[in-house]
Image: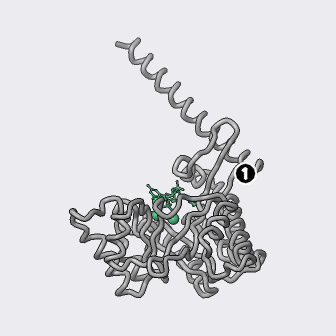
Amino acid sequence: GKEEGRNRSEFFHQKMNEMIWEKSELENKLRLGLINQEFRLHYQPLYDVMSEKIIGFEALLRWSTPDLGLVLPDKFIKHIEDTRLIIPLGNWIIKTACQFAGKLADLGYQDLSVSVNVSVLQIMNEDFAAAVMDAIQEANISPKSIHLEITESRLMESYDLCVQNILKLKNEGIRFAIDDFGTGYSSLNYLKDLPVSTIKIDKSFIRDLSFNSNNNLTELIIILAQKMGLEIVAEGVETPEQYHILKTYRCNIVQGYMISKPLPEEDTIKLLIERNQ
Ligand code: C2E
Ligand code: CA
Ligand code: CA
Ligand code: CA
């Protein structure tokens, strides 16, 4: 009856309040996190199948707070975008990744690339290209050592704004990758229109690879990349079986726990030295 309805609506309002409170609580935590320098980048190797060498790293964001511990990006990236904190945080990410590329170059690893994930909200910002070039100049590195990874599913929303910045940076020598390839609904259009140099096959495809299953779709994506003269990276490679199949298809670059999980900066450099690279 009426009573029940009121209880239900009170319950609803209470839940709404909790949700709003939790949301702004998280926002406050993220803002404080930026001020208190609670964010770090970890680096995961990209491994060249032919030369059996590490040819670069992908920078992956990590956040640890005194009360929440380590939080992975899937839990907060969307929120960081919604609150537009992605602009200051994104600039910090680019700057830090460029500085890491600078350290690598100082150690003699100037040929290794550093890949940075960038949100469409960053790319559509009119200052984006200048911010990237500033970070590169400040770190005293070649633009060629920086790759930017874009997730196609979010590109559609502000395509024209993004393409301008992508072209500007491409002309400076920066390379672009389409991330999570195969999961968006218009992958092929992007390939036609965007000046990308690399396709990263989404890990959902890699997870399904096995000797006794039909791997046609993955094989076709690799053939497509080869025909178009693009580099192809398989992400989420965990097992020798997956690696072997990808090698058979002549996928040239792999990334995943089989090679290494994402590591803090010092461990990344240790890994290179240990491997005699
Ligand atoms: P992504 O760009 O597709 O990154 C690959 C994700 O797969 C990473 O998750 C990585 O840790 C994980 N991974 C690597 N190897 C394996 C493997 O062998 N098996 C499996 N199952 N997973 C593997 P992570 O670090 O949690 O990042 C999740 C997503 O958050 C990223 O997906 C990316 O979309 C976003 N992200 C991470 N760092 C940044 C950043 O600095 N900026 C922006 N805008 N987004 C970021
Ligand atoms: Ca990525
Ligand atoms: Ca990916
Ligand atoms: Ca992803």
Q: Is residue 177 visible?
A: yes
In this rendering, position of residue 18 left or right of residue 180 = right
Q: 232 and 13: which one is in front?
A: 232
Residue at 57% from the left image edge and 35% from the top image edge: 20
Q: Looking at the image, is 163 positioned above or below residue 202?
A: below
Residue 123, visible in the rendered structure = no
Q: Secondary structure at mark 1?
A: helix
From the top left corner, tell me how far across and down residue 18 is, in percent: 56, 30
Q: Nearer the viewer, residue 263 or 136?
A: 263
**Front residue of this view, candidates 18 and 238:** 238
Relative to 13, does residue 231 appear above or below in the rendering? Answer: below
Residue 136 rendering spot, x and y as whole percentages = 72, 77
Q: Is residue 62 left or right of residue 259?
A: right
Q: Amino acid at mark 1?
A: Leu
Q: How many marks?
A: 1
Q: How is the image coloured?
A: one colour
- Quadrant assignment, res 131: bottom right
- Residue located at (72% from left, 51% from top): 34
Q: Is 217 located above or below residue 77 in the figure?
A: below
Which residue is depicted at the point 35% across and 59% down? 207
Classify the position of the N terminus by image quarter: top left
Q: Is residue 143 left or right of residue 213?
A: right
Looking at the rendering, which quadrant does residue 193 occupy?
Answer: bottom left
Few, some or many C-alpha atoms within 10 Å of disc 1 (few <14, some 14-19, many ≥20)? some
Q: Identify the residue under disc 1.
A: 34
* Rendered-image quadrant of the C terminus: bottom right
In x, y percent, where is residue 50? Answer: 45, 81
Whole-percent x, y for residue 123 in the image = 59, 70
Mark 1 C-beta to ligand 1 under 8 Å? no
Residue drawn at (78%, 75%) of the image: 138
